[in-house]
Image (cartoon, grey):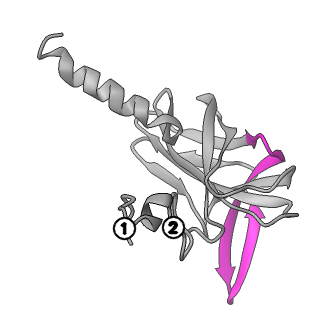
Amino acid sequence: MTPRTLPALVLTLVLGAAGPALAQAGALKVGQPWSRATPGGARVAAGYVTVTNTGAAPDRLTGGSFERAGRVELHTMSTEGGVMRMAPLPNGVEVKPGETVTLSPGGNHLMFMDLTAPLKQGEAVKGTLTFEKAGTVPVEFAVGAIAAKAPGEKAPGDKTPSDKAGGHSGHAH
């Protein structure tokens, strides 16, 4: 190994360690696919993700799949007169060149319909994202706390084993 190859090796190891948190399809970079835990008997859940277009042409997120759902739809959420409203986005979500689109709670999101089993905090569930030009991208959705507002967020009072032992888990408290 030469000093010139060391940075490339380090970058390869770092990106490889990112695992399911980062996927790429052509000029699209998909980051942090996540969902929330669901109570038993829930028939729907939401999925969230960021998509960055590093290319020169727009693309469009049109749907996807989720191994525990009968179907996946893209939805938008808005508040009108103090009432939350959700509606399908039948034409998907455009990802313009040089932009990042974030599907997040309270805004555009994936709807996992007809769930076959509850989602449990801490697990990863396989799925795909489908783009008009880039095609199908495999992803894993990390399942967070039932009330999480961001990926990896713990529920109030949640303690990791190292927290219980007085150690530091690496999360802000």
In the rendered image, residue 164, in percent from the top left (x then y), is placed at 47, 67
Magenta-highlighted stretch: main secondary structure? strand
The earlier-in-sequence mark between 2 and 1 is: 2
Within the magenta stretch, is there residue 18? no
Snapshot quadrant of residue 16: top left
Q: Residue furthest bottom?
A: 81
Q: Residue at x 88, y 63 (%)?
A: 41
In the rendered image, residue 42, in percent from the top left (x then y), is placed at 84, 63
Q: Residue at x 78, y 67 (%)?
A: 39
In the image, which is nearer the foreground, mark 2 or mark 1?
2
Within the magenta stretch, is there residue 81? yes
For label 2, the residue is 159
In the rendered image, residue 46, in percent from the top left (x then y), is placed at 70, 59
Q: Residue furthest left?
A: 3
State yes or no: discs 2 and 1 in contact (Cβ < 8 Å): no
Magenta region: which residues? 65-88
For label 1, the residue is 172
Q: Residue at x 51, y 67 (%)?
A: 159
Query: Mark 1 falls on what kind of element?
Result: loop
The image shows residue 40, relative to residue 113, as above or below, that is: below
Q: Nearer the viewer, residue 93 or 9?
A: 9
Give the amino acid type for the residue marked by disc 1 in the picture. Ala
Q: Nearer the viewer, residue 135 or 146?
A: 146
Whole-angstrom CA distance, mark 2 to mark 1, is 12 Å
Give the amino acid type for the residue marked by disc 2 in the picture. Lys
Position of 162 compared to 94: left or right?
left
Q: Nearer the viewer, residue 73 or 148?
A: 148
In the rendered image, residue 147, in percent from the top left (x then y), is placed at 62, 71
The image shows residue 30, relative to residue 90, as above or below, that is: above
